Amino acid sequence: MFELKGKTALVTGAGSGIGAAIAQLFARAGAFVAVIDKQAEHAHTVASSLKDENLSASDHCLDVTHPESCQAMVEAFQNTHGKIDLLVNNAGIGHVGTLMETTGEDLDRMYATNVRGVFNMAKAVLPDMIGAGKGNIINLASIGGVVAVRDRLAYCTTKFAVVGLTKCIALDHASEGIRCNCICPGRVETPFVKARLAEYPDPEAAYREMASTQALGRMAQPEEIASAALYLASDASAFITGTDFVIDGGWSAGK
């Protein structure tokens, strides 16, 4: 029911974590997946693992903060593979700090990746999607784009912007056959999070503290977020657009 046979998908930030899980699940559902990451070796590793499963994938090194590079990458992909059916804007970065602990440079750096990166990639793929009369964009926001999170001012500011950007794209282009939704995960046990936990004096205690914000008492696994992306990418969700899909283990249930 959630197959993507015959579709092409671009997934940014796909070299690890949630992005890699999405790329893997999309490929296994039948899509040709462009594995895109700022770290070329990470993108190559994920794409190679998919090819080892006899799945269809290519790897691309891209910094989404550069609009010209985004445009060039999309055009090169189109020249080789034709249409682009799906774009998943997963590339993103984090920052810890209150307003008083955050500099203007911190905010600009976060905005460049988390907001302009989404803007740049959507801007690059939309013309051909509009020309084809169909297209599907999925943005990765955060629970921090729906409710405030302590000590995450810059991060939350940009993720709230991603939610708004998603809704505007959905509304502006619905009549042209474009769907746009975003996923708002709670805490996810990615390699990045595991590495940060390992830096604490007591990693297990740090995990319990971070997991306690979710009513289910644990962090999500990347594959659980990927499953939601697959649903939004498939025709089973054809009547869904402009939605912020919260997957937070109950974090926001009482807010």
Image (cartoon, rainbow, N blue to C red):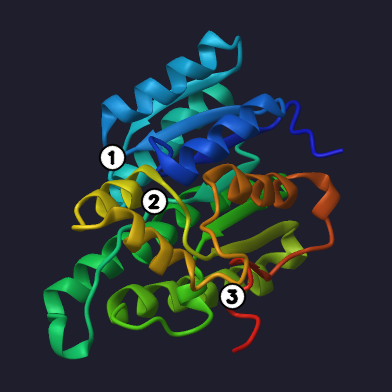
Label 3, residues with CA under 10 Å away: few <14, some 14-19, many ≥20: some
Q: Amino acid at mark 3?
A: Cys
Q: Secondary structure at mark 3?
A: helix
- In this orientation, which residue lies closer to the viewer: 87 or 27? 27
Q: CA distance from mark 3 to mark 1?
A: 27 Å
Nearest to N terminus: mark 3 or mark 2 = 2
Q: Are marks 3 and 1 in contact (CB under 8 Å)?
A: no
Question: Which residue is labeled 1 in the image?
Answer: 38
Q: Are marks 1 and 2 in contact (CB under 8 Å)?
A: yes
Give residue 198's position: percent from left, percent from top: 25, 49
Please indicate, yes or no, whether residue 112 appears anywhere in the rendered image. Answer: yes
Give residue 8's position: percent from left, percent from top: 62, 32
Quarter of the image for the C terminus: give it.
bottom right
Residue drawn at the location 36% of the way across and 80% of the way down: 157
Q: CA distance from mark 1 to mark 2?
A: 9 Å
Comparing labels 3 and 1, the label whose residue is closer to the camera = 1
Residue drawn at the location 34% of the way across and 47% of the way down: 194
- In this orientation, which residue lies closer to the viewer: 12 or 136? 12
Question: Which residue is labeled 2 in the image?
Answer: 91
Q: Amino acid at mark 1?
A: Lys
Which numbered tag is attached to residue 205? none
Q: Amino acid at mark 2?
A: Ala
Q: Is residue 66 left or right of residue 54?
A: left
Residue drawn at the location 51% of the way across and 57% of the way down: 219
Question: Which residue is labeled 3 in the image?
Answer: 168
